[in-house]
Image: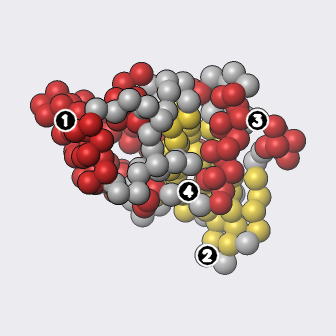
Amino acid sequence: MIVRTVLLAAAMAFAPVAFADTEAPEWVTEARQKSAQLGARLVDALREALVSRGPTGGVEACSIKAPQIAQQISNDRFEVGRTALRVRNPDNAPDDWETSVLQRFERGLSHGTDPAGLEEWQVETTDGGRVGRYMKAIPTGPQCVLCHGENIAPDLRETIQRLYPEDQATGFAPGELRGAFSVRVQLPATD
């Protein structure tokens, strides 16, 4: 696999780089929109479940609705999802590129980078064609620690363990990197 990256090697080694809209190819703009759409729909679904059934209902709804929403936003050209270094759902485990980007995002946060600016993209060329890869950081918000923090209520912890026996996604504090939206885009053979 030949990988062509839009990031400079030095920038990749030390910190993630936020790109201005004028520098981004059109597919990155579309990937940003897909990520924002996924985030907004997940928040809406979670909020609805929390209001109607509380935190336990929120975890149950998230286990069902999150994959459905990602699938609804994805299409023939875009594959949209989430990943993290510590996943709740093992189906969301990162690949090698996602792992390295998440690690750069963590370094950026530890150096005071605004999480709203943490994004990265590259183009991979394989035998199957060209694929754009895009990631956008998801910081842990104050509301996230209800299900992803240190002090999780016992009944909620039981529900999490029942739905996600391999859960690794607890112990977070607000401001830490929770994960990232990850988008794969099928690109034309040439620019």
Q: Position of residue 23 (x, y in %)?
A: 70, 36
* Mark 2, secondary structure of its residue: loop
Closer to viewer: mark 2 or mark 1: 1
Cβ atoms under marks 1 and 3 closer than 8 Å: no
Please state if 178 lies on the left or on the right of 14 as rendered.
Answer: left
Seen at 42% across and 32% down, the residue is 149
Distance from disc 1 to disc 3, alpha carbons, whole Å, reads 37 Å
The residue beneath circle 2 is: 128
Residue 73: which numbered mark, if any? none
Look at the image and tell me whether residue 138 can be seen: no
Residue 15: which numbered mark, if any? 3
Nearest the camera: 190 or 1? 1
Cβ atoms under marks 1 and 4 closer than 8 Å: no
Distance from disc 2 to disc 1, alpha carbons, whole Å, reads 40 Å
Seen at 34% across and 29% down, the residue is 146
The residue beneath circle 4 is: 94
> Closer to the N terminus: mark 2 or mark 1?
1
> Closer to the N terminus: mark 4 or mark 3?
3
> Closer to the N terminus: mark 1 or mark 4?
1
* Mark 1, secondary structure of its residue: helix
Residue extending farthest left: 52
The residue beneath circle 1 is: 49
Local crowd size for mark 3, using a 10 Å CA cut-off: few (<14), some (14–19), many (≥20): many
Look at the image and tell me whether residue 49 can be seen: yes
Cβ atoms under marks 4 and 3 closer than 8 Å: no
